[in-house]
Image (cartoon, rainbow, N blue to C red):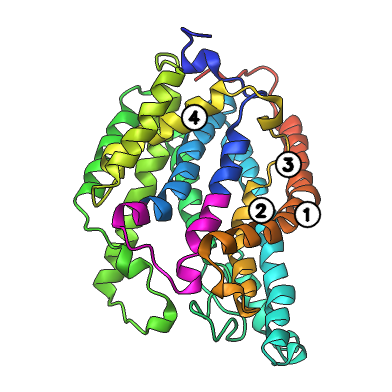
Amino acid sequence: MGGASLGQAFDPRNNALNAWRLVMATGVILCHSWPLTGRRVSFEPAHQLLRDVWVDGFFAVSGFLITWSWFKNPRIRDFFVARGLRILPGLWVCLIVVAFVIAPISAVIQGGSPGKLLLSLEPVKYVLANSAVLIVKHDVGGTPQGIPWPGQWDGSLWTLIFEAMCYIVIAVLGSLGLLRRRWLIPALFVLALFWSARLPPLSGVVEEPPSAGKQIDASTAAMVMEAVTARFAVMFLAGALVYQFRDVIPARWWLVAPSFVIVLAASLLPNYRLVGAIPLAYAIIVSGALIRNRLLNLRTDVSYGMYIYAWPIQQLLIVCGLGVLNPFVFAIVAAVATLPLAALSWFVVEKPALALKSRFQRRSVVPAVAPRPG
């Protein structure tokens, strides 16, 4: 495999990308252990990487796999059914668990009335308002409260709308036949990079908890939205770019290590993605292709469950008084506490939903038309 390209080295049935996604989901738990407990990493390069690199890695892997998925089966209905069944059932059940289980438990711990909360319309409002991926209601009847980050039960879910937007863009460009133009993804990546470069870093605004009482005017809010949209566009397109050039990109361990070093060095910049986006995408995807260890070839993908349940579990642990723990210790406790919910989400919700996807696609296949390779 020494001279193999990424296209030759990557085996969709034997790779470590699920393991990588689990690592990144756990990294998000570590990242949130500072702001949720009222702390902040003082060294800005470390702060930037700790805050951004995990979700950026998710978007890079998603750009690679979702672009591949389109070329494997370029039928728009199948594409959206597959994406919807992967995200929505797990999200809906998570919203229900937060609204009807976790929020009432927090009310009990803080001496409130869970019955009053459950008998109100607040849990139902929370589920319905957020069920379309765009998160617009953050609290359940005013809970959680009395903690460093009050009024927000699942702050991780805000990224899902950007993931969905990336899916829509791929589907639209694919349906129009533009994805087959070799220049399109590189051009979009360069445009996204320039777009991101012209925006100021806004981490201080984004990370302010509601308890800070800081008012954000409309122009600042619009700039924040523009900055995060550019951020995710850069990372998703970096993964898509790696997919497009997979047959000429060398898959070498000796290139993976320097790629991680470049990412670390790029953290000295206000926006590390201007230099580190492609190296990060390369390092994660290529190392995932090269690792063929049976233990790391995870068939059980609990990363999504870890991602969507971690924030509410962390908030609940803080309500219980565990926010005084060292952030690293707190992250370990939170990860251990989240894992059972993530496993239940996979085995009870996500995996059965994926089985429905397979049935739907078998019914919708047109035998006379075979999808062309990407």
Q: Earlier in the sequence, mark 2 or mark 1?
A: 2
In this rendering, which labeled residue sits more in front, label 3 or label 1?
1
Decide: is 135 above or below 268: below
Of pointers 4 and 1, the one earlier in the residue sequence: 4
Q: Which residue shows up at 45% across the image and 26% down it?
A: 243
Q: Which residue is mark 3?
A: 354
| Secondary structure type for disc 1 | helix
> In x, y percent, where is residue 271?
27, 49
**Is residue 314 visible in the rendered structure shown here?**
yes
Gap in Å between the C-alphas at discs 3 and 4? 23 Å
Q: Amino acid at mark 2?
A: Gly
Dot 2 falls on a residue whose secondary structure is helix
Looking at the picture, which amino acid does disc 4 mark? Ile
**Mark 2–mark 1 contact, CB under 8 Å?**
yes
Local packing at callout 1 (Cα closer than 10 Å; few below 14, some 14-19, many 20+) is some
- Magenta highlight on residue 28: yes
Q: CA distance from mark 2 to mark 3?
A: 14 Å
Q: Which residue is mark 2?
A: 305
Mark 3 vs mark 1, CA separation in Å: 15 Å
Q: How many marks?
A: 4
**Horizontal placement of 315 versus 57: left or right?**
right
Main SS of the magenta segment? helix
Q: Please give the name of the residue rendered at 53% of the width and 80% of the height, measured from the top-left corner.
A: 151
Residue at 68%, 47% (x, y): give it. 302
Per the image, the residue denoted by label 1 is: 344
Query: Label 4 near label 3: C-beta < 8 Å?
Result: no
Q: Cα distance, mark 2 to mark 4? A: 21 Å
Q: Which mark is residue 243?
A: none
Q: Which of pointers 2 and 4 lies earlier in the amino acid sequence?
A: 4
Q: Which residues are magenta?
A: 26-48
Amino acid identity at mark 3? Leu
